[in-house]
Image (spheres, rainbow, N blue to C red):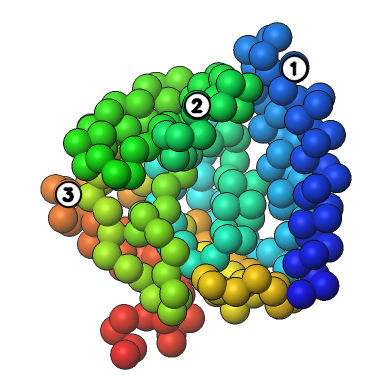
Amino acid sequence: MIRTILMLAFWGVTAPIAAIIGFPWTLITGDIRLLYAMFTWGAFAGVRLAGVRVETDGLERLDRSRSYIFMSNHVSNLDPPILIRKIPGRTSVMVKKELFKYPILGQAMRIGSLVPVDRGNRDAGIDAVKEAQDAIKQGLSMMIYIEGKRSFDGKLLPFKKGPFYLALESGVPVVPVTIAGTHQAMPKGQFAIKPGLVRLIFHPPIEPKDFGDRDHLMEKVRQAIEGGLPEQYRALSS
């Protein structure tokens, strides 16, 4: 519990500082990079302060001049601050549409080309795919939690179909990412953080020519992500 409080206290101090400096700069210049760097650094530093160590594997496989669609599993609230910081360059993510209603925050998110998602409207998924395509055309990568929500037991949930439509339409490589260790550090439904090691595995990019159809691509991504999980969290082992 103390580690969690320490992390939140750190965020409580650094986030306002980043906002005071970063928001005006972003709104004046139209450039999100400073704000993005400050918030991603602060979020990751808070997790490290709580005793969570992070190792990455496979980043050398990525061409930093290219855009990718990163598809990851999701088991903990620690996943976003860890993963976003480790993805090379700047990435766009899908966020709740309601957050765009806040004047300053909404404008900054639009400048950053974040993608609004209306989770209560199935038809809105088409609009989200189109906006994500626009972000990719700007040279950004997309980071997507492919299950759509956190897993309680650490095993993969069914995948959402929308991201695979996005991959097929945009024609950029897909990078499956396995997050292992955050389920032990801070599983869904728990507040306290346990110190430990988190591994991020960036699997080899799946090139558009190797996609096949949507179902084949989905199966390739599932096999890659699941293959990086500890054995007890693989469906085939149960």
> Along the line of sight, which residue is nearer the eye, 104 or 153?
104
Label 3 crowd bin: few (<14), some (14–19), many (20+), radius 10 Å:
some
Residue 24: % across, % down? 75, 17
- Find residue 79 and report its image quarter: bottom right
Specify whether 124 is left or right of 56: left
At a point 58% along the width and 33% down the height, the residue shown is 90
Sequence-first tag of 2 and 1: 1
The span from disc 1 to disc 3 (Cα, nearest Å) is: 42 Å
Which amino acid type is shown beneath numbered disc 1? Pro
Q: Nearer the viewer, residue 162 or 205?
A: 162
Instruction: Measure the alpha-carbon separation of dots 2 and 1.
Output: 18 Å
Question: Label 1 belongs to which residue?
Answer: 24
- Per the image, label 1 sits on a secondary structure element best described as helix
Label 2 close to label 3 by CB (< 8 Å)? no
Name the kind of residue labelled 2 in the image.
Answer: Lys
Q: Which residue is mark 2?
A: 101
Residue at the spot x=73%, y=60% of the render?
47
Q: Would you say residue 68 is visible in this rendering?
A: no
Give x and y (percent) for residue 169.
23, 32
Q: Is residue 237 above or below residue 140?
A: below
Asked where in the image residue 40 lies, by quadrant, the reply is top right
Residue 3 drawn at (x, y percent) = 80, 70
Look at label 3 and name its amino acid: Arg
Q: Residues within 10 Å of mark 2 (few under 14, many from 20)?
A: few
Vertical placement of residue 114 versus 43, above or below: above
Q: Which badge, 2 or 3, is on the more N-terminal residue?
A: 2
Residue, disc 3: 214
Q: Nearer the viewer, mark 2 or mark 1?
A: 2
Seen in the image, is 126 located left or right of residue 67?
left
From this viewpoint, which residue is outermost toward the top?
A: 28
Chain-order first, disc 1 or disc 3? 1
